[in-house]
Image (cartoon, rainbow, N blue to C red):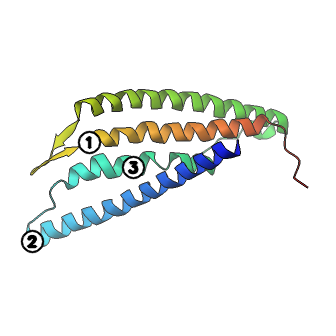
């Protein structure tokens, strides 16, 4: 279990770095585009396509796993706060499991779409060149599956008996 958690932790960290880099590159690209457009009437070609297809996909889907790992998603605990601890853990485990199943299915549908677009080499036309967009389709399954994996791990932890500390 620790090996799986370590691998998932490393993948989550890598995706978070990619998302951060995407945000930084998006900021630079848009700032450069606006500056050049209004000062020299020479916009950066492909800005809209790069922001829409590459930077936004990474910035939106890749942090999913990190947010779940830290358990920073919004949770409404109005009814579960009154439950005894074992029942609360059971409800939490069930919610995590149900959510993981949903995300796995969502990721599967995204992977089917990504695979089809990979096969055809999906691209969109920018003003001066074509931009391949099929690689960005893989952000959906990668982001959702990694979040589902954290949910499964957390669900197991909710129902597993606490381990005694090592001597």
| Percent x, y of residue 82 | 80, 38
Location of residue 118 in the rendering, given as x and y in whole percent from the top left corner = 29, 33
Q: Residue at x 47, y 42 (%)?
A: 143
The number of numbered discs placed on residues in the rendered structure image is 3
Classify 54 as above or below 111: below
Answer few, some or many: residues within 10 Å of disc 3's Cα (few below 14, many 20 plus, some between 14 and 19). many
Can you tell which of label 1 and label 2 is closer to the viewer?
1
The quarter of the picture where the N terminus appears is top right
Give the residue displayed 18% in from the left and 41% down from the top. Answer: 124
Mark 2: give few (<14), some (14-19) or many (20+) Cα within 10 Å: few
101 with respect to 89 (left or right): left
Q: In the rendering, at what x and y percent does residue 79 appear?
A: 73, 36
Tell me the mark number nearer the camera, choosing from 3 and 2: 3
Label 2, on which residue?
40
Mark 1 vs 3, N-terminal side: 3
Q: Secondary structure at mark 3?
A: helix
Check disc 2 and report its element: helix, strand or loop.
helix
Toward which corner of the image does residue 34 lie, by quadrant? bottom left
Task: Give the distance between the C-alpha atoms of the residues marked 1 and 2, in whole angstroms.
Answer: 29 Å
Asked if residue 117 is positioned above or below residue 35 in the image, the reply reads above
Res 133 visible: yes
Residue positioned 8% across, 67% down in the render: 41
Q: Which mark is residue 156?
A: none
Disc sitting over residue 58 in the figure: 3
Give the residue at the far bottom of this rendering: 39
Q: Is residue 69 left or right of residue 129?
A: right
Badge 1 is on which residue? 133
């Amino acid at each position: 279990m620790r090996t799986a958690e370590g691998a998932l932790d490393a993948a989550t960290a890598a995706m978070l770095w990619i998302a951060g880099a995407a945000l930084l590159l998006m900021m630079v690209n848009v700032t450069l585009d606006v500056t050049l457009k209004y000062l020299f009437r020479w916009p950066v070609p492909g800005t809209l396509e790069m922001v829409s297809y590459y930077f936004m996909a990474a910035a939106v889907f890749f942090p999913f796993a990190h947010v779940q790992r830290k358990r920073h998603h919004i949770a409404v605990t109005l009814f579960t706060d009154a439950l005894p601890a074992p029942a609360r853990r059971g409800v939490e485990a069930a919610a995590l499991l149900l959510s993981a199943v949903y995300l796995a299915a969502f990721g599967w549908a995204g992977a089917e779409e990504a695979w089809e677009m990979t096969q055809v080499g999906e691209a969109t036309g920018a003003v001066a060149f074509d931009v391949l967009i099929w690689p960005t389709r893989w952000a959906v399954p990668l982001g959702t599956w990694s979040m589902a994996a954290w949910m499964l791990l957390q669900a197991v932890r909710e129902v597993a008996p606490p381990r005694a500390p090592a001597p």
